[in-house]
Amino acid sequence: MKRRSGIMHWLNLALSSPIGLWIQRAFLAAIWFAACKDKLLFPRQFRSFIERYQIPWLEGWPLVLVTLTIPVLELLLGFLLLTGFALQGALILTAGLMLAFLVLIGQAAIRGLDITNCGCFSVKDQPEGLARFFDSMGFHIVFDLFLLGIALFVYWKTFGPTSPRRMLGQRSSTSAPEPYSPQ
């Protein structure tokens, strides 16, 4: 049997280890915590950022619902990813939100909307210096793809067919309990 070596092999082993997977989850949690802070503190400003995307069906009560729901969901996902509680659902929701954000930012870029600050991390009108770069749409398209990749990688390594849970025969946290049968 051929022994595998090389940087990619060792990187895969490190990232796939329980500690490596927890560090990636903690990184995603930190991103969610950073993203929700300003949105929770300044919901009116966050609402104005959402309006800049000019989505026709997102007016009135749907806009208010999204404005109030997104930051709370981001906070909840941060806690779930950090603690590991309902991890499968948290990873699926993280990947789903990243896809939704990619579509939202992508459609704005395609339509030529001049959105200098996407509102992802800051609700300041004009971020300055390095913050301006980090709030640009181009950066967030690449960054959201990176975060989506992390969420999918952690999901695959934790719940996929070759995950330790599957190999050891452990049930997933979302599977139904075994029926009681007296012996």
Image (cartoon, rainbow, N blue to C red):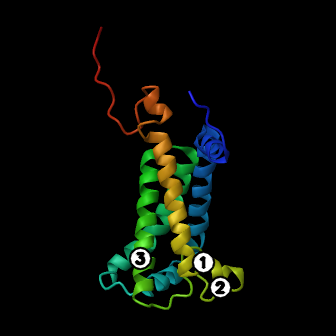
Q: Nearer the viewer, residue 174 or 5?
A: 5
Q: Amino acid at mark 1?
A: Ser
Residue wearing tag 2:
127
85 up-or-down from 109: above or below: above
First reached walking from the N terminus: tag 2 or tag 3: 3
Q: Are marks 1 and 2 in contact (CB under 8 Å)?
A: yes
Q: Which mark is residue 104?
A: 3
| In the image: residue 109, left or right of residue 35 | left
Q: How dense is the environment of label 2, judged by Cα within 10 Å: few (below 14), some, or many (20 and up)? A: some
How far apart in space, not on screen, are marks 1 and 2 (Cα)? 8 Å
Relative image position of residue 111 (x, y in whole percent): 39, 88
Relative image position of residue 10 (x, y in whole percent): 65, 42
Q: Residue at x 51, y 77 (%)?
A: 43
How far apart in space, not on screen, are marks 2 and 3 (Cα)? 20 Å
Q: Which mark is residue 122?
A: 1
Q: Are marks 3 and 1 in contact (CB under 8 Å)?
A: no
**SS assignment at label 2:** loop
**SS assignment at label 1:** loop
The quadrant in which the C terminus is found is: top left
Q: How dense is the environment of label 3, judged by Cα within 10 Å: few (below 14), some, or many (20 and up)? A: some
| In the image: residue 122, left or right of residue 72 | right
Q: Which mark is residue 49?
A: none
First reached walking from the N terminus: tag 3 or tag 1: 3
Q: Is residue 114 visible?
A: yes
